Image: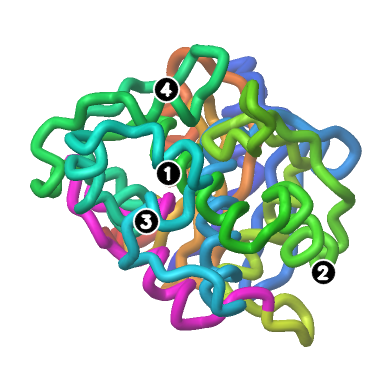
Amino acid sequence: MNIPDFDGLVREIQRNNWQVFGLELWEDGKLTASFGDTRNTRYPIYSVTKSMVSLAAGMAIEDGALNTDDCVLRYLPGEYVRAMSEGQKQAYAPVTLQRLMTMSVEGFPFRLSGDDWLEEALRIPLNNPETRTFAYSNVPAYLTGVAVSEAVGERLDKYLSRRLFAPLGIPDPPCQFSPEGYFYGASGMELTVNELSRVGLTLSREGRYGQKQIVSPAYVREATSVRQMNREGGYGYFFWKYRDGFSLNGKWGQKCYVLPTQRLMITFLSHMEEGSDKIRECMERHLLDNGHDADI
């Protein structure tokens, strides 16, 4: 039987002077251990922001405003789509929201940098757009966020605050916008460790928080399962496959791991520009693989 060694994990973090701001361990849906600053300070969550866009898409589907099988151009502002060349419109024809959320479109740069990101994104020549290939970029999350915002008729940060964060007791989090005023979607949000845990807890309960169904169970199951294979083991709708469950990942050690079989959830926020995998490996030794073989 696995017995999580939370104290051993904390000692190793402290011994290595890793910049871990806060850490929470949840067992059977209950917070059983914590370390550091988990409630007082919001920290950047970087690409975990993408998972929030996915949840916004799931809620928009439930509202009847969105279909992930539709081409993204259906939801983007008309003036931008009309300004595209016919060749670009044809290239974008197979680019559905589902393709964007699974990062399965080749050709996007890692990030956008001009004065109008939407115009810039729609001018990018795509490589074999009909072929599904995992190609990680910030552009798909940005485009998805714009599409969801247009579909629901509300700025995406406001929609997320109303539909996701407020029911979870989370005040409006800081976030980043594109030069033309859209929610960035790929990064730029800040949360406390405990706030991120509340999002993870909602996902672990198939979209329910307390007595309120935030997003449909069907969407949570679809979004957090493998929809596109990659060398890391698989990708959902802006979620990563992890062991028997899934994870929300930021670039320098912002993590929420949801493990249904072991009935565990581990959340931590850190800032390690190099070696952030060491925290994950340490977590696995002390919390997941301590005393039994891992469920890989």
The residues tagged by marks 2 and 4 sit, at their Cα atoms, a distance apart of 35 Å
Q: Name the residue under label 4.
A: 120
Q: In this view, does 256 lie to the left or right of 233?
A: right
**Above-or-below relation of 153 to 194:** below
Residue 290 image position (x, y, % from top left): 43, 53
CB-based contact (under 8 Å), mark 3 and mark 1: no
CB-based contact (under 8 Å), mark 2 and mark 1: no
Q: Is mark 1 on a helix, strand or loop?
A: helix
The residues tagged by marks 3 and 4 sit, at their Cα atoms, a distance apart of 18 Å
Residue 36 image position (x, y, % from top left): 79, 35
The residues tagged by marks 2 and 1 sit, at their Cα atoms, a distance apart of 35 Å
User: What residue type is disc 3 on?
Assistant: Leu
**Residue 153: in sight, yes or no?**
yes
CB-based contact (under 8 Å), mark 4 and mark 1: no
Q: Mark 2 or mark 1: name the one nearer the start of the chain.
A: 2
Front residue of this view, candidates 169 and 131: 131
Mark 2 against mark 4, which lies toward the viewer? Answer: 4
The residues tagged by marks 3 and 1 sit, at their Cα atoms, a distance apart of 37 Å
